[in-house]
Amino acid sequence: MSDSTERSITVKIPHVPVVDRFPFPFQEDSYRYSNNARALRSGKVIQITPDYHEEIRKKRKLLLEKPNLAYQSFSHSMEAQWEILELLMNELVSVYPSYFSLQKRGDHILFYNHLLDEKETFTFGDKESLACEPLDFIGRHVQEDLIYLGQRDGDLYMDAGQLCFPANWSIAFDLGMSYLEFHSPVPHFSESGLAAKVRNFLLQMEVGKPFTRYNWTITLDPILETFPETYDEWGKKKYELTPEKVGEMVHLRVEDQRLTRLPLSNGILFSIHTDLISMKDLIKKSEWSERFEKVLVDLPDYMAEYKGFSTYKEQITNYLKSVNTTTK
Ligand code: HEM
């Protein structure tokens, strides 16, 4: 066994302020739905950020207290789940060798998470040797939500997923749906034919050529777990918002969504890494603050409605406008 696998001290993630690492999603002053997927140059699925410990704690708590909201799967996804576990475990140890290490003796696996000071032992392919399903297991070590899409009969189906930080959609509701079915609530996306075009693009994705795209919305307070099933807990926040609270309460929420073709199952791994930034932090970069104001002013009502902030959009634009005119 190598020294690195035996280390028992926990290692630290360097602190980087959110404003220096936030994936600001807008390239222009206007935003419309489009196939905004671009080649993922790094080819990697996972990003470890300074929020790691807090987000893993939240994830595990949700999986314990609301297991059916945060995890769903079909039994026919099991082989693909092992494939995803192996892919991500190998990526973690190669990209973050000081945070994770691995020892394999045949199918016997020793996986070390030095960030959490945890050692996991299991037999690859033997479900009974893990405390939970393979996708659920590896999802408990990474900040990303992990969705598995099976590809068959010329379509993509939601076959499994660990979804702890949904932007108001439900894996319990969507499990088993096809790509067009689970996108059906998105206004204009299906009717315009864009959803079908994107699906055809995804069906042709090749092994070794992953893609990434940003999605965004707005959340009040830094709440990652916006499940539709718990709307009564977080949905009422909009009644607390006042002009004085915009800087603290309003958060731009960005999802870095990555799409990876899986060679064995021929399915797709859809990973979602979510970051939040408060308006108070966002305005530290005047180019972000100015651009976000323009994007919001230009945004069609149906999008603000769908994303859930139409009732307080004006409060945000007023806030940004006053900041942007003062700093000019
Ligand atoms: C293949 C993996 C994907 C999965 C599993 C997925 C899943 C979802 C889900 C569940 C929603 C929420 C729908 C609801 O309101 O219930 C959504 C929204 C959306 N998806 Fe996808 N999606 C995928 C890929 C893509 C791609 C490649 C695009 C490219 C255009 C896309 C575009 C959108 C858009 C525009 C929305 C609306 C988001 C918003 O306005 O906040 N999706 N997606």
Image (tube, grey):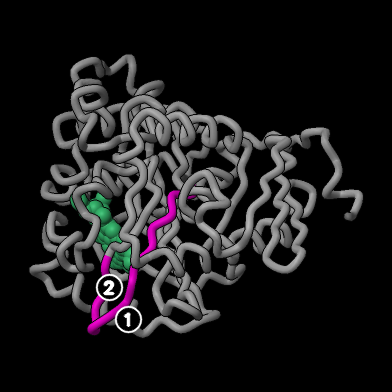
* 126 left or right of 32 in image: right
Q: Amino acid at mark 2?
A: Leu
Q: Is residue 163 left or right of residue 169?
A: right
Query: Which type of secondary structure does the marked residue at label 2 adopt?
Result: strand
x%, y% of residue 4?
86, 49
Q: Position of residue 317 (x, y in %)?
A: 27, 34
Q: Residue furthest front?
A: 128
User: Eyeballing the image, is 198 above or below 96?
Assistant: below
The residue nearer to you, when weighing 302 against 288, is 302
> Ligand 1 is found in which quarter of the picture?
bottom left
Name the residue: 53% across, 30% down: 57
Rate crowding at label 1 as few (under 14), some (14 to 19) or many (20 or more) other CA atoms within 10 Å. some
Quick one: quadrant of the C terminus? top left
53 or 15: nearer the eye?
53
* Residues rendered magenta in the picture: 144-157
Whether label 2 lies within 8 Å of ligand 1 gets the answer yes
Closest to the observer: 235 or 181?
181
Q: Residue at x 50, y 80 (%)?
A: 263
Q: Residues within 10 Å of mark 2 (few under 14, many from 20)?
A: many
Residue 145, horizontal then vertical, whole percent: 43, 49
Residue assigned mark 2: 156
Asked whether the viewer can see residue 282, the reply is no
Name the residue nearer the viewer: 81 or 145.
81
Res 201 quadrant in image = bottom left
Say which mark, if any, is on residue 203.
1
Q: Residue at x 59, y 60 (%)?
A: 88
Mark 1–mark 2 contact, CB under 8 Å? yes
